[in-house]
Amino acid sequence: MTELAHLEGARVMLGYVASFLFAIVMQAVSKFSAMNRHKKDKADEKSKERFNRYTSDTMLAGDRSVGNFVEWQGAFLVLFWTNIVVAGAKEVWLGWVYVGIRFLYPVLAYLGGVKQGGAQPLILLATVPGYYVLLRYMYLIYMAVY
């Protein structure tokens, strides 16, 4: 592994951690937004129920943003670093693409990409490129070891 690949990998990891922190912030924003909307509805007598995070699309968007990040972090981290170590650090720039979609996912989820009824087509703008990056790294690693 070259020093340059090491450094670029470290830069991507800093961006990756920043995208995780962004997802956490968006989760908090979603929670406070949903709670404030509920308080307003209660004050306007549009609702008499207690706040329930599990029936709020806004809260679900925040929760799924963090959940999706955690679900896929193992695959990304293993494939990214295995590509650097075993496959000759090919296409390390795809790590930045993945970081970008990790920033994009919470925004799209908050804008309606994730709802109680399931994922909406809007969220595919983040998930499809993410899957591509993971599959591409799998291919590069496979080609290097076989």
Image (cartoon, rainbow, N blue to C red):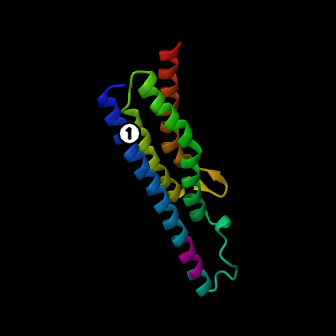
- In the rendered image, residue 74, in percent from the top left (x then y), is placed at 56, 40
Residue at 64% over, 68% down: 53
User: Can the viewer see residue 132?
Assistant: no
**In this rendering, would 65 be left or right of 54?**
left
Residue at 57% over, 75% down: 35
- In the rendered image, residue 47, in percent from the top left (x then y), is placed at 66, 80
- Which quadrant of the figure has residue 7? top left
In the image, residue 121 sits, relative to residue 33, either above or below, namely above
Seen as rendered, the residue at the extreme left is 4
Which quadrant is the N terminus positioned in? Answer: top left
Seen as rendered, the residue at the extreme top is 146
In the image, residue 136 sits, relative to residue 54, either above or below, namely above
Residue at 55% over, 60% down: 62
**In this rendering, would 90 be left or right of 44?**
left
The part of the chain drawn in magenta is: 34-39
User: Can the viewer see residue 142?
Assistant: yes
Q: What residue is pinned by disc 1?
A: 96
- Which quadrant of the figure has residue 81? top left
**In this rendering, would 143 be left or right of 88?**
right
- In the rendered image, residue 137, in percent from the top left (x then y), is placed at 48, 27
- In the rendered image, residue 104, in percent from the top left (x then y), is placed at 44, 49
Q: Is 67 in front, or is 118?
A: 67
Sort mark 1 into few (<14), some (14-19) or many (20+) by Cα contacts within 10 Å.
some
Say what amino acid the circle numbered 1 marks. Answer: Trp
- In reply to whether residue 109 is colored magenta, the answer given is no
Q: Is 19 in front, or is 121?
A: 19
Q: Is 65 in front, or is 84?
A: 84
